[in-house]
Amino acid sequence: MSDPQLVWIVDGIRSPFGRFGGGLREVSVVDLARQTLQAVVQRTAWPVQDVSELNAGMAMIEGGLMVPARQYAMAAGFPETLPSLTVDRACCSGMTTVGLGWRAIQSGARSTIALGIESMSQTPRLLHETRWGSKRGDLTVEDLLMLRNPLAGGGSIARSAGEEAVNRGVGREEQDAWALQSHERYFKALADGYFDDEITPVSTPGGDLRLDEQPRSDSSLEKLARLEPVYGGPTVTAGNAPGLNDGAVALILSGSAALADNGATPLAKVHSHLQIAGTPTSSVYLPGLAIARILQNAGLTPRDLDVIEINEAFAATAVVSIKTLADGDAGLEEQLAARTNMNGGAVAIGHATGASGARLVLTAARQLKRIGGRWAVAAICGGFGQTDAILIEAAQ
């Protein structure tokens, strides 16, 4: 652990993920960040004076919050001298903050905090054409939560995801089956106490929110099959896609010197970070390509992975990415599917866009330690055909 190039995940914590308009609706994104940042520092007893930078990922910056990361740092009571950066890579944002911390520590930073956060419930509509007035004609109000792809003719991301999935041999039944599995795995993990030390309560005007609000315990293949596809697409429904959610995740990353100086036992080691991009509608399979490449760079194969986390931007994303990673090997595909999102994914937990990438890293690291494995990977698509991947190694 004395190698100055090593980057360690000290620990992390997340808020419950709230439903759109649910328990976190009245909590400002700044207050959500404050509570989550203070919780991770309290849990780890990590000295904030030893943190070199705070990187915050958030996808809906257009909502009007100026310099969010700086506001989060001040709200949490961090030193005024702490540099901060806000990142917008859409859904990739939270994972990118982990990658930025990895790079910073390899360049000499002692420790960093990676924050992923989103309040989709508080994302406003945008009223265009009003700055200089309009004497005649209609005004345009844009709802950012329609999640359109301006690089693909302004069409629905959900529709293009379904079309790409079908083109790669993954139909509606497979996507519904994965969605049901996501809920089933989540509730098993919940019953086993897996989330007990991952989630920190959030204080709201209506009381403390302690549990994720999105998971549905009564989900079934029959109910999923009755749902109509959204936005005229072929397969994606409200049942095999996550909701619009609120939530925050914070992780502390450290170099070896700070780890030793603070007497901390790390959760895991960040081996590497990778970003790739493809066509504007490639997101449904891009995580599979990113995982393959980060493994190749490390001299590993998919069979070496003990834990895989792929964001369920849609159930199709996980299924198609696994198929892509297996590259035609049916036996390997089955093995990889069993190791992917073992405690449920975003279809069950929810997808707070800026936060999900950080959640995947936290979940992958915790699950790796839980099962005593060696290698884990987390990958997430976003930003109109971009993907981040993080390769994680056990701390031992």
Image (cartoon, grey):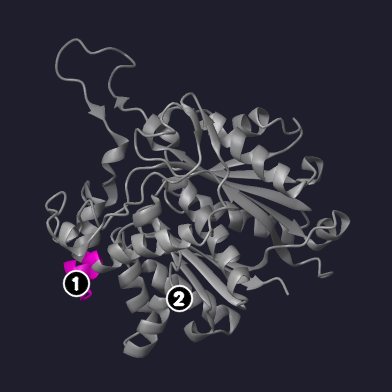
Residue designated by label 1: 167
x and y, in percent, of residue 392 in the image: 60, 69
* Disc 1 and disc 2 in contact, CB within 8 angstroms: no
Identify the magenta region: 164-176
Residue designated by label 2: 339
Q: Secondary structure at mark 1?
A: helix
At label 2, the amino acid type is Arg
Give the image quarter of residue 391. Answer: bottom right
Q: Is residue 90 visible?
A: yes
Near-viewer residue (183 or 87): 183
Q: Is residue 350 magenta?
A: no
Left or right position of 330 against 122 = left
Give the image quarter of residue 108. Answer: bottom right
Q: Secondary structure at mark 2?
A: loop
At 71% from the left and 63% from the top, the residue drawn is: 7
Give the image quarter of residue 338. Answer: bottom left
| Residue 49 higher or lower than 271, as above or below | above
